[in-house]
Image (cartoon, rainbow, N blue to C red):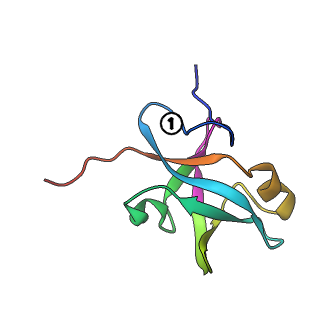
Amino acid sequence: MVATSSSTSSPTPTEGRRTVARILGPKGLRGGVRVEVLTDWPERLAVGTEVWIDGTPHATRITASESGGKSLILYLGSLTNREAGEGASGRYLEAATKELPE
């Protein structure tokens, strides 16, 4: 069973993943989304990183990012228009758990 989250509950990441951000809403027409960063390791949200939108079985890649004032704007390969960004609002982004260097 895949663990999922909603905007009304705390993030419950899928096994082997960590919750790294919450999608706040769309930004622009190209599928960008404003996110609330939930990780102390911002490199988990770097361009080229694979992330999962909670409840989805397939990863998507962060294709671009920009500063949006108080929030970070991410462009994900699977979100290509504003409607897709609106549909992802309130969902969480998960990243694969990585070993930390000693």
Which residue is the extreme one toward the top? 1
Judge left or right: residue 21 versus residue 89: left
Q: Which residue is drawn at 58% across and 25% down?
A: 2
Judge left or right: residue 82 versus residue 33: right
Residue annotated with mark 1? 13
Judge left or right: residue 100 versus residue 87: left
SS for dot 1: loop
Q: Which residue is drawn at 49% across and 59% down?
A: 49
Q: Which residue is drawn at 67% across and 46% down?
A: 91
Membership of 53 in magenta stretch: yes
Front position in the image: 49 or 40: 40
Front position in the image: 48 or 75: 75
Quarter occupied by the N terminus: top right
Residue neighbourhood size for the residue with mark 1, other residues' Cα within 10 Å, grouped as few (<14), some (14–19), many (≥20): many
**Residue 94, x across and y down, in percent:** 52, 46
**Residue 68, x across and y down, in percent:** 64, 78
Segment colored magenta = 52-61
**Residue 72, x across and y down, in percent:** 59, 71
Q: Residue at x 24, y 51 (%)?
A: 100
Membership of 85 in magenta stretch: no
Which residue is the extreme one toward the left? 102
Question: Which is the main secondary structure of the residues drawn in magenta?
Answer: loop
Q: How many numbered discs, if any?
A: 1
User: Which amino acid lies under the numbered mark 1 shown in the image of this protein?
Assistant: Pro
Judge left or right: residue 66 versus residue 7: left
**Residue 95, x across and y down, in percent:** 47, 48
Front position in the image: 36 or 28: 36
